[in-house]
Amino acid sequence: DSGVTQTPKHLITATGQRVTLRCSPRSGDLSVYWYQQSLDQGLQFLIQYYNGEERAKGNILERFSAQQFPDLHSELNLSSLELGDSALYFCASSPPRTGDTEAFFGQGTRLTVV
Amino acid sequence: ILNVEQSPQSLHVQEGDSTNFTCSFPSSNFYALHWYRWETAKSPEALFVMTLNGDEKKKGRISATLNTKEGYSYLYIKGSQPEDSATYLCASRSNDYKLSFGAGTTVTVRA
C-alpha cells in the first residue's frame, strides 16, 4: 500500500457526462500528479499541483481540470466525456524534501465511457 | 508525443539470464531520472531516483546507470527470475517540475 488513495476504483459513465476523480496523497506529501494511461499508451502526464498551486501542466485537454484543496487532496474533473477518454487515471504524490524524490502511486481509477 | 523513449518495448529472457534495456530522455533542462517497476494489476513502484551524471544505483539484482550528457539510462537485471516479470518505466523530471514517463519495457522471464 503506497498510502495514496484514489476513489472511485471504477467508473462507468455515458458520453457527454462529467465525472470527478479524487486523490488523497500520502500524509505529508505536498505534490500531487495526475496521469492518464490509455490502451497502448504509456503514462501521459496531465498536471501537477504543489501545496495547492498548479506547478506543471502536460497535455491536459481543456475539457479536463484539476485542483488541490487546502487539506492537500486533489480532484480531477473530466467533462463532456468522449469514448476516447476511457482510460486508467493515476494519481501520485511525492514529499517536499530537497533534492529529487520518487513518486508514490495510487491504485488508479478505471474510467469507462460508453 | 513522448519525449522519454524506452527500448525495446518488450523482451523475453530465460530464467537465470541477464538483460538490460534503455531509456533516453532530453538532456537539456534535466533534473532527475526515475525508474519504476509496474506489475500487472498494481500501481508503479519506484526502484531508483538518479540525478548526477555517472550515477549508478543497485537494488538486489537490479541496477541502473545514468548519462545525463547524452541523455540515456540503462537498467540491468542480473540472473533474471520469474518474479522480475513486469513493465519497467523510466521517467525524466525536468527543471520545470514535470515528471514525464516513457511507455515502458515489458520484461517476461521464462522459467
Image: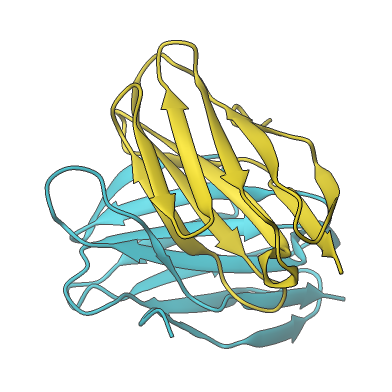
Chain colours: A cyan, B yellow
Q: Position of residue A5 (x, y in %)?
A: 42, 84
Side of A55 relative to B23 (left or right): left
Q: Residue at horizontal 30%, vertical 33%?
A: B51
Closer to the camera in the image, B9 or B59: B59
| B110 over A43 or under it: above or below | below
Q: Quadrant of residue A2?
A: bottom left
Closer to the camera in the image, B42 or A85: B42
Q: Quadrant of residue B85?
A: bottom right
| A33 over A56 or under it: above or below | below
Side of B75 relative to A110 (left or right): left
Q: Residue at horizontal 63%, vertical 73%?
A: A18
Q: Residue furthest left?
A: A98
Q: Position of residue A114 (x, y in %)?
A: 87, 76
The answer to whether residue A93 is visible is: yes
Closer to the camera in the image, B85 or A110: B85
Q: Position of residue A56 (x, y in %)?
A: 36, 41
| B32 over A80 or under it: above or below | above
| B96 over B49 or under it: above or below | above
Quadrant assignment for the N terminus of chain B? top right
Q: Residue at horizontal 34%, vertical 65%?
A: A93
Closer to the camera in the image, A44 or A63: A44
Side of A66 relative to A90 (left or right): left
Quadrant assignment for the C terminus of chain B? bottom right
Q: Position of residue B107 (x, y in %)?
A: 76, 55
